[in-house]
Image (cartoon, rainbow, N blue to C red):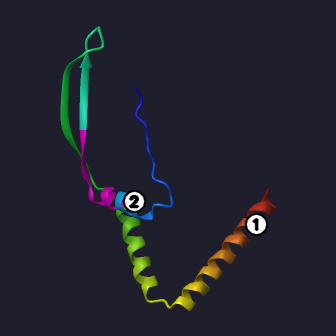
Amino acid sequence: MPKRIVRPSASKGDDLDKIMLKKALGYYVEESVEEYDENDNVTKRRVSMKYVPPDTAAIKAVLERESKLRELKGYTDEQLAALKAELLAKLKSADADGEAKR
């Protein structure tokens, strides 16, 4: 039976932060191996703990996000609104360039 993969939605930023932090720090996962007989009954079950080491890409992403958040905390509401308008303009410009290349 295939495992079902559940991915968090992009709207759940807190969950994504927790996942990235977990991946950046490393974690343990329980792994089980089962053996079946000819009647599909479980004859042996081995459960072990597997260590997943820290991921350098996740460490880098977490550190970059933290530094950006610290940087943004010093901004006033007006500065944040101006930055938002600037970034939206860049996105529209990039989207227009992409449409022109098609």
For the residue pair 81 and 87, the one nearer the viewer reads as 81
Q: Does residue 87 show up magenta in the picture?
A: no
Instruction: Pick the quarter of the image with the C terminus.
Output: bottom right
For badge 1, the amino acid type reads Asp
Q: Which residue is mark 2?
A: 15
Q: Is residue 13 left or right of residue 97?
A: left
Q: Is residue 92 above or below residue 36?
A: below
Q: Is residue 82 left or right of residue 65?
A: right
Name the residue located 48 percent from the left edge and 89 percent from the top edge.
75
Q: Is residue 101 left or right of residue 62?
A: right
Where does the magenta region start and end? 20-30
Percent x, y of residue 67: 40, 77
Q: Is residue 50 left or right of residue 68?
A: left
For badge 2, the amino acid type reads Asp
Percent x, y of residue 91: 67, 71
Name the residue located 26 percent from the left edge and 15 percent from the top edge.
41
Q: Quadrant of residue 70?
A: bottom left
Q: Quadrant of residue 79?
A: bottom right
Q: Which mark is residue 97?
A: 1
For the residue pair 18 and 89, the one nearer the viewer reads as 18
